[in-house]
Image (cartoon, grey):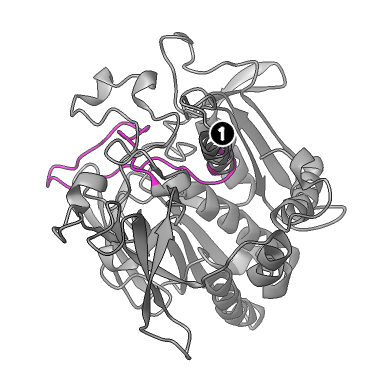
């Protein structure tokens, strides 16, 4: 697909819906307003060529922080598409990576072996699923050109076991048998001829070299000719001020710059965390008219067990909050705000990740008759060992299969998602 197959103009959609679009960057939140502006307001900064650097204050009655993450490339020395590795975290990044990958394919076609490295570029990166999807598609493209013998494809991840995906792994009901995602993932990797390195915390990337530490404390280097490594995520870095102009950023945001919501952030051992500690309405505890759904909210703790190397480096995936869960969170925030405007005093709609299922379809090769997609559902996303003491999840709703049907499902979902995002007729019938 081209860039224009995966993007559309927001202005056309928002104009049709009567939504005012200010295409700018939010830099400050003033939840109490100030002496001149009684309402809360957000300071935005324009980045287009005509108004670059200009700021404006935008009033609000309710504020939804749905910024998603900052791609924190600088957290790993030498990481990023403007340095020594590629990314697929935006459509421009993905197009840039594909353009350069074709150079490697041409070298293979000329008989030169190429080393392809894909995975996580930070010891605590999340979004392993995106990298997993990418490595399968890269392997597929190489295989269909008959270049397998000239490609060394390696998966490099901070996961303790393959298939962790930042969700502590899972067991899935596959053909009547309960299969761990470790086996599910390893079998697909093996089928595609992919090598893997796990329990690895990348801390430096040089041209053609990724330096990483293992959980066992080894300092190792993986050489490559092409590398796509997912960065760590952080909040976007907005600051907050009270009505007297005193900075209150640390009261509203966690140290990772994600916004605090109605979660239990009380420090305690990982084993003592409970499903009830996860937020359900995504409301800031200090300012009740501010919400943060999706990856913009600060999780109370990791889902995967924290692991530390002998040197003290934490090497484990942080909690994912993208995709279907983010859509569900956004919907319940919208519903609750709508009812608040109409006079409701309580939040009737909730969506805790410990009470929410998720479905994921991983593309593993594009082809009408020979494509492949791996489909998986989990319930709930955050394991609940009290309710489901044997498996942590409801095995009636934790399923997984791989095949051509998954490819077609992924293909159809692409167009269905865009139909919904553009607000076309009956968009509301399409679930998150």
- Which residue is at the front of the view, 282 or 345? 345
Percent x, y of residue 362: 64, 46
The residue sitting at 75% across, 58% down in the picture is 366
Quadrant of the rendering where the N terminus is positioned = bottom right
Question: Image height check: is 287 above or below 173?
Answer: below
- Which residue is at the front of the view, 259 or 55? 55
Q: In which quarter of the image is residue 202?
A: bottom left
Q: Quadrant of residue 144?
A: bottom right
**Would you say residue 155 sits in the magenta stretch?**
no
- Which residue is at the front of the view, 183 or 149? 183
- For residue 2, say whether it is visible: no
Magenta region, mostly helix, strand or loop? loop
Pointer 1 residue: 339
Direction from residue 153 to residue 362 in the image, left or right: right
- For residue 132, say whether it is visible: yes
**Would you say residue 315 sits in the magenta stretch?**
yes
| Region of the chain picked out in magenta, as a range | 297-326
Percent x, y of residue 310: 13, 42
Q: Quadrant of residue 365?
A: bottom right
Percent x, y of residue 305: 31, 31
> Mark 1 packing: few (<14 Cα in 10 Å), some, or many (20+)?
some
Direction from residue 255 to residue 347 in the image, left or right: right
Percent x, y of residue 167: 44, 34
Direction from residue 352 to residue 375 in the image, left or right: right
Quadrant of the rendering where the C terminus is positioned = top right
Question: Image height check: is 152 above or below 130?
Answer: below
The residue sitting at 82% across, 45% down in the picture is 426
């Amino acid at each position: 697909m081209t860039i224009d197959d995966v993007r559309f103009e927001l202005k056309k959609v928002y104009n049709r819906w009567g939504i005012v679009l200010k295409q700018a960057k939010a830099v400050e939140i003033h939840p109490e307003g100030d002496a001149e502006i009684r309402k809360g307001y957000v300071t935005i900064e324009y980045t287009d060529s005509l108004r670059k650097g200009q700021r404006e204050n935008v009033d609000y009655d309710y504020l939804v922080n749905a910024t998603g993450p900052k791609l924190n490339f600088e957290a790993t020395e030498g990481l990023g598409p403007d340095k020594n590795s590629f990314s697929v975290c935006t459509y421009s990044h993905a197009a840039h990576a594909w353009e350069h990958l074709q150079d490697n394919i041409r070298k293979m076609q000329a008989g030169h072996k190429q080393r392809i490295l894909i995975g996580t570029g930070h010891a605590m990166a999340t979004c392993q699923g995106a990298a997993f999807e990418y490595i399968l598609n890269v392997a597929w493209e190489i295989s269909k050109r008959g270049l397998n013998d000239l490609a060394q494809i390696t998966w490099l991840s901070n996961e303790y076991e393959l298939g962790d995906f930042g969700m502590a792994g899972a067991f899935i009901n596959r053909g009547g048998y309960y299969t761990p995602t470790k086996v599910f993932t390893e079998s697909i990797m093996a089928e595609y001829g992919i090598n893997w390195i796990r329990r690895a915390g990348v801390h430096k990337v040089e041209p053609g070299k990724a330096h990483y530490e293992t959980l066992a404390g080894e300092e190792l280097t993986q050489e490559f000719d092409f590398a796509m490594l997912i960065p760590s995520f952080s909040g976007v870095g907005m600051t907050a001020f009270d009505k007297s102009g005193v900075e209150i950023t640390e009261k509203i945001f966690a140290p990772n710059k994600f916004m605090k919501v109605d979660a239990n952030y009380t420090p305690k051992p990982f084993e003592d965390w409970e499903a009830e500690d996860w937020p359900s309405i995504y409301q800031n505890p200090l300012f009740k008219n501010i919400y943060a759904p999706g990856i913009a909210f600060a999780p109370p703790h990791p889902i995967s067990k924290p692991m530390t190397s002998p040197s003290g480096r934490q090497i484990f995936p942080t909690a994912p909050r993208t995709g279907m869960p983010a859509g569900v969170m956004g919907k319940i925030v919208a519903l609750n705000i709508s009812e608040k405007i109409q006079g409701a005093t309580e939040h009737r709609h909730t969506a805790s990740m410990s009470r929410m299922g998720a479905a994921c379809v991983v593309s593993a090769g594009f082809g009408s008759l020979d494509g492949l997609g791996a489909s998986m559902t989990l319930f709930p996303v955050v394991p609940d060992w009290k309710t489901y003491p044997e498996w942590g999840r409801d095995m009636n709703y934790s399923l997984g299969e791989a095949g051509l049907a998954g490819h077609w499902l992924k293909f159809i979902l692409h167009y269905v998602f865009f139909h919904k995002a553009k607000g076309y007729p009956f968009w509301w019938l399409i679930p998150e």
